[in-house]
Amino acid sequence: MRYFFAYFVSAVVASLVVTLPSARAGRDLEAYFWYRQSLSEKVEHSCLIYVARVEKLSKSSVDFSVIEILKGDKKLLGDKPIRCSFPLFSLYCGINEDKDARYVIFDREWRGAGGGLDFYGALEGKSTPSFVKDALKLLSGDRHTLLEFCGKHLSSEDKAIAREIDLEFKASTSKDIAAASRKLNLGELRNVVKNEKLPLSNQDLACMLLAYHGNAGDVDLVTAAAKRLAKEKLGEKALIGAVLLSPKKDGWQLLCDMLHDRERDFSNRYNAILAIRYLFPEPPEGLTKKDIAIAMDKGLEQADIADFLVEDLRRWRVWDHTDHILALAKKKSHEHPVIRRATVRYALDCPQKAAHAYIAEFRRRNPSFVADVEENLENARKFEQHDQK
């Protein structure tokens, strides 16, 4: 369904130029993870970051010249031209034919024979180099200061910057997000929400940031934006913003409608789940964890999101809906292995007698399945305990 994989690195090093590795099996997965790393993580994993422009382009390779070093020692590049496999580079970044186009290139240490550099990823955009350069100065400081900086760039039309801003906020705690939001200009945030020409992720994020210190007059603006973004299969943060602004009425009702309407696209309902994950640890005044759990319980009837909800209830140790979860496990619509695994995980952690009986019967019928789930659950618990510290 939605689970994944390990990956490996493959590369080649040539002798006449600084040749960054070619695209091979495995690099597409690295690109997948690159697109999900925050700028902070990209920087942490890079030994050299520099601004470059394209000097020569062919079907097989791209030659760059360095304009400015942002991190690391230029000596790592030597005096040779910088060449990257075109198929590899295109996994991470499009090639802009404008001769004035600029790229921020991230390299890491090549751990294979001979050492050297390994292409890690790249960003392209007119304003991206200055954004990355300024962000680098803030990475060692307070987290909310970096987020404040990112929030002030929500009015940028640069899609690469928009993506990095979104990833940075996703990698942050609600405490840091709230602290950063209160330093942003309300009027500017409202303008971002209203400006449909800006990247959709900027509009989405602005809704949540506005909610932290907006007022009742912003409810209609944010809920309207959430509905508009839902048509684009986005709106997770706008839903959060709507609930923060109106936890008893319009905002919470909108989130519930989004979650419970099985006719809606999967992405809409999944965005509602993501919003719930953000809200559950510290619900806004007027909304309780019990309210959220009841809404989740109602969503369990939908087989394509049931495994998410069951697993979240297990992680949060909410046992009030055990009977419903175990009953659903017997329905034909919920026989999918992923739902079955989530239910067994839930029952293994649940202290109720009904759960113990369910596991005993399941173990009798399929002992190897339960043993496998127990082993994986033990590892999951270690991560969950670490996250709670």
Image: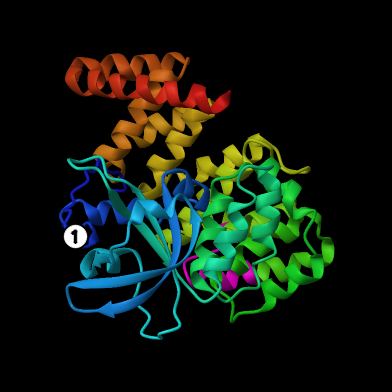
- Residue beneath disc 1: 22
Q: Is residue 279 left or right of residue 296?
A: right
Residue 264 seen in the figure: no
| Residue with the most extreme front position | 79
Residue at the spot 24% in from the left edge and 57% down from the top edge: 28
Measured as percent of width and height from the top left, residue 167 is found at 51, 54
Instruction: Specify how the rendered protein is coloured.
Output: rainbow
Measured as percent of width and height from the top left, residue 30 is found at 29, 51
- Inspect the magenta stretch and tell me whether residue 274 lies in it: no
Q: Is residue 95 above or below residue 121?
A: below
Splitting the image into 4 quarters, where does residue 8 fall? top left
Residue at the spot 26% in from the left edge and 79% down from the top edge: 57
Measured as percent of width and height from the top left, residue 343 is found at 36, 30
Splitting the image into 4 quarters, where does residue 240 fall? bottom right
Residue 217 seen in the figure: yes
Question: Dot 1, crowdedness within 10 Å: few (<14), some or many (≥20)?
Answer: many
Give whichever of 278, 290 is nearer the camera: 278
Q: Secondary structure at mark 1?
A: loop
Q: Is residue 11 left or right of residue 159?
A: left
Q: Is residue 370 above or below residue 216?
A: above
**Amino acid identity at mark 1:** Ser
- Inspect the magenta stretch and tell me whether residue 228 lies in it: yes
Range drawn in magenta: 225-236
| Residue with the most extreme bottom position | 98
Residue at the spot 48% in from the left edge and 49% down from the top edge: 43
Give whichever of 204, 279 is nearer the camera: 204
Measured as percent of width and height from the top left, residue 184 is found at 77, 60
Q: In the rendered picture of this protein, how many numbered marks are placed on residues? A: 1
Give whichever of 71, 353 is nearer the camera: 71
Residue at the spot 41% in from the left edge and 46% down from the top edge: 47
